[in-house]
Image (spheres, rainbow, N blue to C red):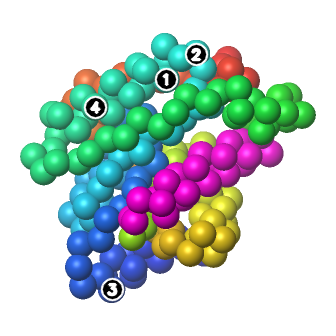
Amino acid sequence: MNYNLLMEKEIKSLDYRPKLLLHVCCGPCSSAVLEVLNKYFDITIYYYNPNTYPYDEFKKRLDQVVKLINEGYDNKINIIEGSYDDEDFYKFIEGHESDKEGGPRCHLCYRYRLENTCKFAKENNYDYFCTTLSVSPYKDSKVLNEIGKELEEKYNIKYLYSDFKKKDGYKRSIELSSKYKLYRQDYCGCKYSMH
């Protein structure tokens, strides 16, 4: 399944500028994704990452998202900081602490963050929800999009299918990170991903 093509078809079908709740994990991943989506959607960034350890790192990554928005965008992109419910997150992935990186623990993490994003989007009358996670070559876009589809059906709100690493999206995120001098972390987020 070419999820990038599905996204492009969806965008071409738009006859208005929809409201999109975009889950973001960090500034670097947000950069290339915002460059694509900002042309077509009224975007609200939803920074919901209770998986990020320690809390100082959570705040540092949020600061980089704010920096990117302030320096890179003339039109107003709102940012909502989700709660840091790390204890609930660690309960949710219990039993998967020793999974290898990219395995079932990570898939649970995708689900945890995407479901929270989806619920928030539904409760606040957004037209779509989406995540920047697929820009990373380390994230499984098939799993992400399958979760998005399930949540779309469960909550009756549109999920924007995507694979932002396509068409050199990841490469572009590196270029934009350099342009805006964004901090690029060397681990995904949770304490089990620290090497």
User: Which residue is located at x 41 percent, y 59 percent?
Assistant: 124
Q: Which residue is mark 4?
A: 66
Q: Which residue is mark 1?
A: 58
Q: Residue furthest left?
A: 74
What amino acid is at disc 1?
A: Phe
User: Horizontally, is 103 left or right of 132 in the view?
Assistant: right
**Mark 2 → mark 4, Cα distance in angstroms:** 19 Å
**Mark 2 → mark 3, Cα distance in angstroms:** 42 Å
Tell me if label 1 and label 4 are in contact, CB under 8 Å: no
Q: In the rendering, at what x and y percent does residue 56 appear?
A: 49, 13
Q: Callout 1: few (<14), some (14-19), or many (20+) C-alpha neighbours within 10 Å?
A: many
Q: Quadrant of residue 190?
A: top right
Q: Callout 3: few (<14), some (14-19), or many (20+) C-alpha neighbours within 10 Å?
A: few
Q: How many marks?
A: 4
What amino acid is at disc 3?
A: Ser
Tell me if label 2 and label 4 are in contact, CB under 8 Å: no
38 to 74, vertically: above or below: below
**Mark 1 → mark 2, Cα distance in angstroms:** 7 Å
Q: Which label is found at residue 54?
A: 2
What amino acid is at disc 4?
A: Val
Q: Which label is found at residue 10?
A: none
Q: Earlier in the sequence, mark 4 or mark 3?
A: 3
What amino acid is at disc 2?
A: Pro
Q: Earlier in the sequence, mark 2 or mark 4?
A: 2
Q: Which residue is mark 3?
A: 13
23 to 12, vertically: above or below: above
Residue segment shown in magenta: 102-126
